[in-house]
């Protein structure tokens, strides 16, 4: 069921010289009790990778239940704070730099 939904995510691809377009899925863990019984956060991420998507975990903790209060607005409003946005942007930026480095070095295993 999970793989059916994930396989429907289209991966656009445009090649311009050595640089290809890139769809990066920024994944933030769901709370365990909000997932369907047959799913886990790891299972969803693994299925996305298997489908060929670039996935980066932007949870900012080992799991969402352990997320520091510095990273969300309020216990009842889990939207990210500016500190969380900056940390996630840094993770994404580092991933893109590694990706571009892998292309420049023609080393796809660098990711």
Image (cartoon, rainbow, N blue to C red):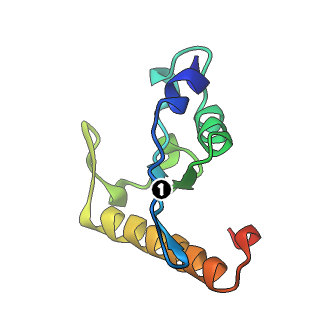
User: What residue do we see at 47% from left, 50% from top?
Assistant: 25
Q: Quarter of the image holding residue 95?
A: bottom right
Instruction: Locate the N terminus by quadrant.
Output: top right
User: What residue do we see at 55% from left, 78% from top?
Assistant: 18
Residue 63 located left or right of residue 30: right
Q: Secondary structure at mark 1?
A: loop
Residue 72 located left or right of residue 90: left
**Foreground residue among 18 and 75:** 18
Q: What crowding class fits label 1: few (fewer than 14 Cα within 10 Å), some (14-19), or many (20 or more)?
A: few
Percent x, y of residue 43: 65, 32
Percent x, y of residue 65: 49, 40
Instruction: Locate the C terminus by quadrant.
Output: bottom right
**Residue that badge 1 annotates:** 13
User: What residue do we see at 45% from left, 23% from top?
Assistant: 34
Q: Is residue 66 above or below residue 88?
A: above
Residue 31 located left or right of residue 40: left
Percent x, y of residue 40: 61, 29
Percent x, y of residue 106: 71, 79
Q: Is residue 58 above or below residue 77?
A: below
Q: Is residue 81 above or below residue 3?
A: below
């Amino acid at each position: 069921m999970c793989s059916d939904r994930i396989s429907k995510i289209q991966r656009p691809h445009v090649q311009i010289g050595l640089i290809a377009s890139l769809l990066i899925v920024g994944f933030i863990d769901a709370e365990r009790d909000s997932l369907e019984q047959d799913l886990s956060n790891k299972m969803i991420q693994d299925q996305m990778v298997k489908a060929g998507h670039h996935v980066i975990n932007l949870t900012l903790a080992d799991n969402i239940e352990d997320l520091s209060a510095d990273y969300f607005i309020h216990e009842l409003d889990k939207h990210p704070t500016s500190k969380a946005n900056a940390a996630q942007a840094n993770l994404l930026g580092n991933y893109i730099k590694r990706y571009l480095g892998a292309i420049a070095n023609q080393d796809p295993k660098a990711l």
